[in-house]
Image (cartoon, grey):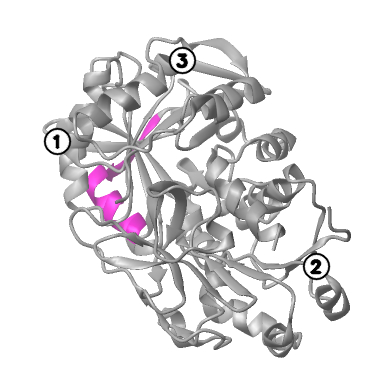
Amino acid sequence: MASGPVALVDAGGANIASLKFALARLGRESLFTRDETIIRGATHVIIPGVGAAADAMARLEATGLDRLIPTLRQPVLGICLGMQLLFEGSDEDHARCLGLLSGQARRFIPAPGRPVPQMGWNALHPREPHPLLAGVGDQAYVYFVHSYALPVCAHTLACADYGGEFAALVARENFHGAQFHPERSGPVGERILKNFLDL
Amino acid sequence: MLTRRIIPCLDVREGRVVKGVQFRNHEDVGGILELARRYRERGADELVFYDITASPEGRQVDRSWVNRVAEVLDLPFCVAGGIRSVADAEEVLNLGADKISINSPALADPGLIDRLSRRFGAQCVVIGIDSLAMDDDWQVYQYTGDPDRTQAARRRTLDWVREVQDRGAGEIVLNCMNSDGVRQGYDIDQLVRVRECCTVPLIASGGAGTERHFLDVFEQADVDGALAASVFHKGLIDILALKRWLAERGVAIRLLEDPADG
């Protein structure tokens, strides 16, 4: 088992307890931090996301983490808003994000049968084999809570359908993103988190 | 495809789970962690914990149990009751809850919804509405956790549903008081009307007695989730069997691949 805590990047927002507990159930300690040295030295870095894109980016910029994150070489996982931050931007408050993956988060438009936010369990449809998806079957359900989503792109490992397909799991080199909450997605989510920690 | 959620509601008082029939004569039905684990194993999609004593009595409550639930549970859960401020909400979310639900405090200070939504995002902010049928319409009630303080909020339910969405609510739980606790089915007529003006997720509450009631509320009122308490706590309906039964009838449902594993 790798040593040292997993770094959870402090981009604002409450509710990281569930993520800390999920990592603890997998035998890993974690530290919620803005400290550049700790983040750079961690075996794995997670960018949790609750809140608004522009607020989170402002917080990263205030501490210089917007420049640090793109230079990281260890496995990085953005969760929910944290995944959206890896892309070029979000329609939410016209936020400019980190630009590590190309694409713009767009708002879901409410329609009959499609309330917004999307809240609940939706099926993952894997598109590309990837270590993050090891042991995860087709049609595995994971828990989503979001109003903005990324279109499917070349780096999409798995998509889901909510009145049209969107990117549910993405990866480019050492940067990964999950639009769903693996820490709240039962055994399937736990497996994906474990797969990430095994990278 | 997004699945319909089956949501056991655990009414909490002083660290124990209780559920009253029409809000009276509460009976103790089990410990919080024990029930949380059991519902996870049976395939619950989400849990709601509702501290029924906190809001009416106006006192600070010991919320350490929220942290213990977050530690054992890998499902989303929502905490309701006694959350009157952004600081209260922050405490509950920091302890590990995914969502907070407010009811009477939102009626007393509707601006609280805007402040919570701005601070934490709409996805964390659930508005509970206790609604009573009256004269071919529905009226909002408040302080329903305490029979002595229960009173009309002097708002039409449909107006309040629109207002809370405008203010930033991310989900609405509609508790239909006429049907609550009597297990004769959800209030389909009311839920259909609320669904028409509700663009955020809508959860039906009050009235579940049989598996058929869940099928009816999903098919006829198009709700995103169905909440129930006593039928689950007393073992009258098994969630795993209910979900299989609903899936066989074409409802989009999350089935567990291996129940023994979770």
Q: CA distance from mark 3 to mark 2?
A: 50 Å
Read off the magenta span. Answer: B151-165
Q: Based on the picture, tell me whether residue B59 belongs to the magenta stretch.
A: no
Cα–Cα gap, marks 1 and 2 = 51 Å
The reply to whether the C-beta atoms of the residues labelled 1 and 2 are less than 8 Å apart is no
SS at mark 2 in the image? loop
**Who's the residue at 65% across and 49% down the image?**
B88
Quarter where residue B230 is shown: top left
Give the amino acid at mark 2. Answer: Thr
Checking the image for residue B220, the label placed there is: 1
Location of residue A101 with respect to B174 vertically, above or below: below
Identify the residue under disc 3. B20
Mark with earlier residue (1, 3): 3
State whether the magenta stretch is mostly helix, strand or loop.
helix
- Residue matched to label 2: A43
**Mark number displayed over residue B69:** none
Query: Viewer-proximal residue, B153 or B182?
Result: B182
Asked whether, in this view, residue B19 is left or right of residue B204, the answer is right
Disc 1 residue type (three-letter) = Gln
Chain on which label 3 sits: B
Query: Could you tell me the amino acid type at mark 3?
Result: Gly
Chain under label 2?
Answer: A
- Residue located 36% across and 55% down the image: B164
Chain under numbered label 1: B
**Residue at 82% from the left image edge and 78% from the top image edge:** A40
